Image (cartoon, rainbow, N blue to C red):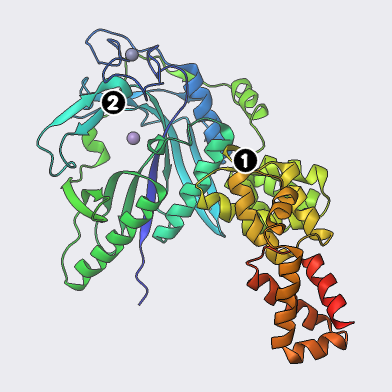
Amino acid sequence: MIYMVKIGLEIHCQLNTKSKLFCSCSTNISEKEPNSETCPVCLGFPGYKPVVNKKAIDFTIGIGIALGCTISNETFFSRKTYFYPDMSKNFQITQYEIPIATGGSIDIEGNKIRIRRVHLEEDPAKIVYANGDISTTEYTLIDYNRSGIPLAEIVTEPDIETPKEARKLLEKISAILEYLNVYDVSKEASLRVDANISSEGERVEIKNITGFENVEKALSYEVIRQKSMTRMKKVIERETRHFDETTRTTKGLRKKEYEEDYGYIFDPDLPSIRIDDAWINSIKDNLPELPDNKVKRFVGEYKISDYDAGVIAYTGKDMADFFEDCCKIYKRYDNISKWIINYLLKSLNWNSQKVSESKVKPNTFIELLEIMDNGEITERYAKELIKEYVDSGISPRALAKKNEFKVTDAELKKTVEGILKENEKALEDLKAGKENAKQYIIGLVLKATNNQANPKLIIKIMEELIH
Ligand code: ZN
Ligand code: MN
C-alpha cells in the first residue's frame, strides 16, 4: 500500500524594506545591541498608533503577482490574539479575512502546488533560549529589535507529496523572491517555515524551521514517526511540534489550537487599504524578468535545453546574468551551459560561493572553453584546471602554462618513452596510425604526470619517437 502524506507550507519571508512595517525603526538589526532598534510602536506601548509602510505592501503585491495570484482590490489588517512574551501587545497585526493576494500556483516537475494566499504581517520579537533549545532552556531573553519587521507569509495548499518536493518548492520560491529583490538571501533566518503534514490522522504542524535542508529532514522524520504510530494503531493528534536540529527529530510542544481560537478582530487603528488596478499594474510593469520567463527565453534565444536553462535561471539571477555575458563573447551556447552545469557549479558549490561572489569572470571562463576548442588543453585536463581556476581566478591559459613547466621537456620525453615501451600493443597500433591508441597513450602520460603536461607536446614527442 502506498503511504500518502499531504504537506502544506507557511513560508515567512522577512522583507528587506528600510524601515519596519508600522514604525520608522530600521530593519537593519544584525549588528545592533539587543532592544536598541525599538520605539513605543514596535514595543507595543498602549496608545501608540501604527502607520503602515507602503513599500511592504508593494513588495507583497509583487510576490503575489510573481506566484500567479489574484491581488485583492481591498485589504485590511486584523489582530491575532495570543499571549506569548515575543508579542508584548498580546496580539500580532496580521491579515486574516482578506489577504493581499490569493489563489496562485507553482509547478514542481509537473506537480502543481497551489498557493492559497500571500499576506503581510509583523514579525514578533526574537526569543533567545539561554541554555539549549525551547525544551531544555533555563530561562529566555527577548530582543525586540526584530519586532515589527515586515513578513510576507506565503501559504500553500496541502498539495506537496514528499519532503523532497517541499524542499524543491522552497528552492523555487526563494529564487523567485531573490529575483524580486524583496529579501536578503544571505541571511538564513530571512525565510522561516512552518510545515503542516498529515497522513492517517490529524494534521501536525512543525513550527519555525530555518534552512531548506532542515525542512526536508523535519518532514522526513515526521513521515516515519507517523507511519510507526499508525502501525501501532496509535491516534495521531492535532499538535504543534518543534524540530531539533542536533537530533534531527521533532518533539511535541503543545496541542494545536485552531485558527478560529485566535479570535481575530479587525484592527481599528489601521484603515482598510484600496489597491486599485493602476497600483497593481505599476508594480506588474516594474517587475524584473522572472526565472520561468528567463528559461523560456534562454531556450528560444540560445537553443539550450529546457533542463539547462532551468538550472541556470534558478541557480540565481547572478548566474543567469553570467551565462548571458558569456554568450556575448562565445557562440557555442550549449557548450557554455554544459560547462556551467557540470563543472563550474560543482566547483562553486564546493567553495559555497555564488558566481557573483567568486573570482570567476565571463572572459576568463570563456578562455577555458577556447583553449579546449583549439587543442591547447584536453577536455580531461580542463576538468582538472577548472577547480584551480575557480579558486584563484587566474586566466586558464596562464594556469595551463604555469603547470606545464612543472614537467620539463626532457622529463616528458622520458615518460613517453617509458610508457611506449611498456605498452607494445598500443605502440603497434600507434605505428599503424590508430587514433584511439594515440588517445590511450596521451591518457597514460597525463596520468603519470598528474595532468601537468601539454597534450600537444606529448603528441609531438610520440611522433618523433615512432618515426
Ligand atoms: Zn519601532
Ligand atoms: Mn504567520
Callout 2 touching callout 1 (CB < 8 Å):
no
Tell whether circle 2 marks a residue whose Cβ is less than 8 angstroms from ligand 2: yes
| Closer to viewer: mark 2 or mark 1 | 1
Q: Where on the picture, by quarter, is residue 4? A: bottom left
> Residue 95 vs residue 138: left or right?
right
Taking the spot 53% from the left edge, 34% from the top edge, the residue there is 63
Numbered label attached to residue 144 = none
Q: Where on the picture, by quarter, is residue 86? A: top left
Label 1 neighbourhood size at 10 Å, few (<14), some (14-19), many (20+)?
some
Q: What's the residue type where badge 2 is placed?
A: Gln
Rendered location of residue 61, percent (x, y):
53, 29
Rendered location of residue 399, percent (x, y):
69, 51
Mark 1: secondary structure: loop
The quarter of the image holding the N terminus is bottom left
Q: What's the residue type where badge 1 is placed?
A: Lys
Q: Where on the picture, by quarter, is residue 306? A: bottom right
Q: Which residue is mark 1?
A: 359
Which residue occupies the foreground of this view, 91 or 351? 351
Which residue occupies the foreground of this view, 51 or 416? 416
The quarter of the image holding the C terminus is bottom right
Q: Which residue is mark 2?
A: 92
207 in relation to 424, above or below: above
438 in relation to 11, above or below: below
Looking at this rendering, what residue extends furthest in the top direction?
Answer: 47
Rendered location of residue 393, percent (x, y):
64, 43
> Residue 169 vs residue 443: left or right?
left
